[in-house]
Image (cartoon, grey):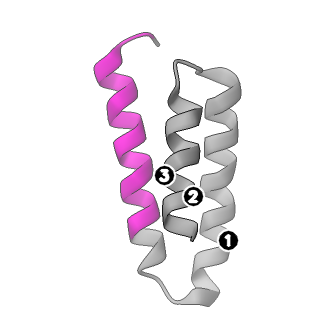
Amino acid sequence: MDDESYLSALVRIFEQALIATNALPADSREPLLARLDRVRNISSQKIDYGVGEDMDSILAKYRS
C-alpha cells in the first residue's frame, strides 16, 4: 500500500465519485455522500500516507 501512484489514483477516483454524486438530484445525493464519507473514514484509519487528509480536503471542497 505504499505505492504512491496507487494512492494518488485512489484519491482521484474519490474526487471523481464526489463530482458525479454532486451532479445527482438532492434526494439521491445524501446516501451516496454518506457512503463516500465512510470510505474517507476507513481510508484515514487503514491506509494513512496522507490519503485521509487529502480526502478530507476534497470532501470539504465539494460539500460546501
Residue toward you, 54 or 2: 54
Please name the amino acid that badge 1 sits on.
Pro
Residue 10 in percent (x, y) is at: 40, 36
- Of labels 2 and 1, earlier in sequence is 1
Q: Residue, x 43% and y 10% (percent of image)?
A: 2
Disc marking residue 60: 2
Residue 19 in percent (x, y) is at: 39, 66
Please name the amino acid that badge 2 sits on.
Ala
What is the distance, in whole Å, between disc 3 and disc 2 at their CAs?
5 Å
Q: Which residue is mark 1?
A: 31
Element at label 3: helix
Determine whether 44 is above or below 21 in the image: above
Q: Residues within 10 Å of mark 1 (few under 14, many from 20)?
A: few
Determine whether 28 is above or below 19 in the image: below
Front position among marks 1 and 3: 3
What is the distance, in whole Å, between disc 1 and disc 3 at their CAs?
18 Å
Element at label 2: helix
Element at label 1: helix
Q: Which residues are magenta?
A: 2-19
Q: Residue furthest top?
A: 2
Disc marking residue 58: 3
Please name the amino acid that badge 3 sits on.
Ile
Q: Residue, x 57% and y 58% (percent of image)?
A: 60
User: In the rendered image, which quarter is residue 45 located in?
Assistant: top right
Q: Are the residues flagged by discs 3 and 2 in contact, CB closer than 8 Å?
A: yes
